[in-house]
Image (cartoon, rainbow, N blue to C red):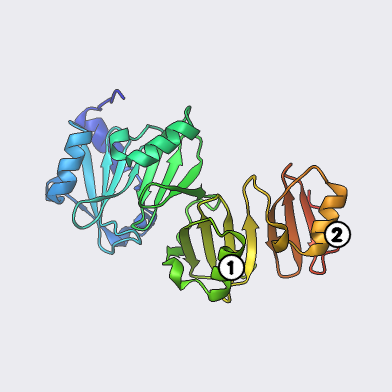
Amino acid sequence: MKKTFLTSLMALSILLSTVSCDSNDDATADKTVIEPTTLPTTAKTFTETYFPNAVYKAVKLNIPSYNGTVYDVSLANGFEIDFDANGNWTEIDGGNNPIPTALIPEKINAYIAANYPGLFVVQIENEKTKYDVELSNDLDLVFTMQGDFVRIDHDGDNHNEVVVNPTTLPAAATTLISTHFPDAVIRLVEKKNIAALNGAIYDVSLSNGFEIDFDANGNWTEIDGGRLAIPNALVPEKIAAYVTANYPALLLTAIDKERTYYDVELSNDLDLVFDLQGNFLRIDK
């Protein structure tokens, strides 16, 4: 990618008005402008290697952010890079510019090239337990630290979750997975700090593409198969019968158990609402 560099005066004017990509930057009292020369050697080497001759400023956070960010670096070419205390990058934001592929884990590059050939990565965040990647069409993708695709992130920038070991799942949740998805591997388990409206505490992503949310006791609250059918045994009998009778050519691909009703999605994206006894209520438009 060809980089355009501004004059020192123009760069200084732009950079002083730049807002860092990190969520802590709104609290100006928690950051201090520093000389780029005081950055850790690893951070300086990284910046000069991948963005040579770029004019930049640096900001040090007095309180590290959730992903370990201590330094925010803003470049004149529009890139913003966050580093931890040791100078390792934690987030790279290119704005509308593609991030150099050399900075993206090889397996993630390969997945995006195969599945989104017309798009490029504009932002990548290393959250220590997963990668969060944003594409040029604003689509957010989540990958494991090994570069395996987990899911599309429809929640956006949600840091209300922490990755936990699958062994910490409640026994009921583990039993459901092993019973109904015996060949699937648990790719990722995220635990919410605050329960969702439907009581969900755990978000589980499986290797077969299924995503299942569980409450604190291990009862499922939502099952999403993507384009795959949810096993009939996991769908209330009355709901399964209604779908079969009225939409025989369609699959039931997602079901959400709210506190007072079920929300069901079919393979044609039609949403149906049922009461907790399985009685059809309406099409959700």
Count of all numbered marks drawn on residues in the image:
2
Give the quadrant of the N terminus.
top left
Q: Quadrant of residue 55?
A: top left
Q: Crowding near pointer 2: few (<14 within 10 Å), some, many (20+)?
A: few
Residue 23, placed above or below residue 76: below
- Comparing 139 with 175, the one in front is 175
Residue 215 position within the rendered picture, expressed as x and y whole percent measured from the top left:
59, 71
Q: State the image coordinates of residue 84 (x, y, percent, origin top left).
A: 24, 55
**In the rendered image, which quarter is residue 64 located in?**
bottom left
- Cα distance, mark 1 to mark 2? 25 Å
Please give the name of the residue rendered at 29% of the width and 56% of the height, measured from the top-left corner: 69
What secondary structure is found at the residue carrying circle 2? strand
Q: Nearer the viewer, residue 61 or 257?
A: 257
Q: Residue at x 87, y 51 (%)?
A: 245
Mark linked to residue 214: 1
Q: Residues within 10 Å of mark 1 (few under 14, many from 20)?
A: many
The amino acid beneath tag 2 is Leu
Q: Is residue 226 above or below residue 76?
A: below
Q: Position of residue 259 (x, y in %)?
A: 71, 70
Residue at image location 83% in from the left, 46% down from the top: 247
Please name the amino acid that badge 1 sits on.
Phe
Earlier in the chain: of badge 1 and badge 2, it is 1
Would residue 100 be seen by someone viewing this image from the given angle? Answer: no
| Residue shown at the point (63%, 67%) measured from the top left | 220
- List the single residue furthest toward the top: 2
Is disc 1 placed on a helix, strand or loop?
strand
Q: Please state which of residues 130 and 187 is positioned toward the viewer in this rendering.
A: 187
Q: Is residue 60 visible?
A: yes
Dot 2 corresponds to which residue?
281
Residue 232 position (above or below residue 35): below
Mark closer to the observer (1, 2): 1
